[in-house]
Image: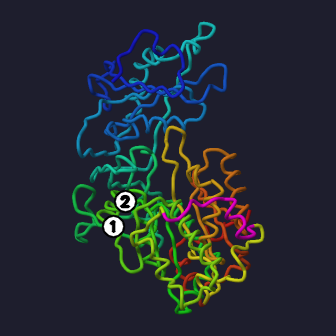
Amino acid sequence: MAVLEKGTFENLSPSRFISFTFPNPHPNNNSYTTPLLRIALLDSPLLPTTPLPKIAALLVPKDREDDWIFSTDYGHFQLLFNSPNISRLILIGNLPTNSPYPIYNHPKQDNSSHLKKFEEKLIPLLFALSPKISFQNGLFPNIPFVSYQDNVIRSVLVETFSGSDVGDFLVEDVEIDLPPEKESDQRLGLGFRFRRRLRFKRIPNLVQTQIPILPFDTSTVNLGLGQTEFRPETGFLVQPYLPPMVASLSLVASILEERIRSGLGRPRVLCIGVGGGALLTFLRTRFEFDILGVEVDEMVLMVARKYFGLVEDEFVRVRVGNGIQMLKDFARQSIHCKNSDTRCNSENVDITDLWYQWNSDFNGDVIEDLEEDQLRDRGNFQNGEVGNSENEGCLDSVDGGGSLIHVIMIDLDSGDAKNGLSAPPLEFIDKSVLLAARLALHERGVLAINVIPPSKSFYDGLVRAFKEFFSELYELDVGNGENFVLIATASPVGCVVSESGNSVMETLRQVVDDRYMNQIQKI
């Protein structure tokens, strides 16, 4: 808690965060009962857009005082960014309990009348915390109370961890409030009201992974969180943007089906950003794919195995590493093979060895950095061509694919809540990375990426960058007001096949909402 000096709050100071305690002016209410309240003040990193800066207050929901959303500067920054044009946000709540396993229960009774009285008692404090510029012409500023709402009815902390790269993170079990139309939807998994979630302290408002959970003992199905043990259910996707990412497979279903039926091996899928492994385990459960996952933090993978049902076998493998670097490594392999003096064929290239080379001790120092000007000479990306036509098909000569990977799925966030929530990270937009992704992709393959655009200019720039290196680009609005999925193909798609006789499409129709496949738009 900060030691405050006179005049501390008179001016706005970009990105300033201060927390302190203050005597509770109205402790006789149902929600905010501690003798001291925790007050947290955050000034926006952006300058005010109006002559009078907008000030707002937010009451921390009762029993969520320990939640990183409300107890850390990372969470406060995200709350501020979710409240457009606010220059100073003031949070008021009970003191954190510092309980090792806090439990939250959404209040069932209506406390609106009590809260109104409590808010009125706080008005003098809010005026004292307002900048001088807010008091123009002798008038007091209007300081609204904004609310925080989500669909969590109950949450129980399972365990906290600290990773070498992602920092502190937690696993929690939650019960969510489902709209009536989803309660009965078991086909797509949307009717599961109990979920297991993974959240990082550095972006606490973002759910990194969530999966359905079911009681271990079916006789306890009517018991709630904290009353029985739960197990992960890996055959469904409940993270809003993952079904749209999987819907991207419909664009290349015929190629994937070809590969499956050919007997050459399963289609190869690279997932960059594993988190709890929900996407990997879903693909393993539902499709005949060969799946690689790349995750930057070993501790995250350990938690995925322990709590989220991630199981490695001959068709699902994971590696700790940098996903962007992994793309560049596969691109170098592709370039080396396509431009070798000796034509590659099944006698001198072991496809499986190339594909699983990442699983052995890999000496990255041997391979030089991937440079854009070097790669540009390797192929004409405007026409969707990659590599040396003489050696086309080098790495996969039987089915005509010149690269290693049939499907690339990317789920990476910016990792910096203080600059606003966004995905992918800025370094992914670098041209050398997109070139690498294109080179690593099978000539008839597809890439799907989760996008959270912090601005229209960010999104437009990402679209332009992808169009420079891929044959076709599609988009899918997830519909949650936050996520988009961009889908890039290495070659023109042509007609999307019907499900008749195509096992990939048949499965997609069973496990992904039709509206996602129907709403894929070429841009």
Quadrant of res 5: top left
Which three-letter amino acid code belongs to the residue tagged 1?
Pro
Disc 2 marks which residue?
A: 195
Quadrant where the N terminus sits is top left
Vertical side of 360 occupied by 165: above or below? above
Name the residue at the top extreme. Answer: 138
Marks 2 & 1, CB-CB < 8 Å contact: no
Which three-letter amino acid code belongs to the residue tagged 2?
Arg
Disc 1 marks which residue?
A: 232
Q: Which residues are magenta?
A: 366-381
Vertical side of 278 occupied by 389: above or below? below
> For this rendering, which residue is in front, 499 or 395?
395
Q: Residue 127 at what x, y percent from top left?
A: 48, 15
Q: Residue at x 55, y 70 (%)?
A: 330
Name the residue at the right extreme. Answer: 383
Q: Could you tell whether 339 is left or right of 237 in the image?
A: right
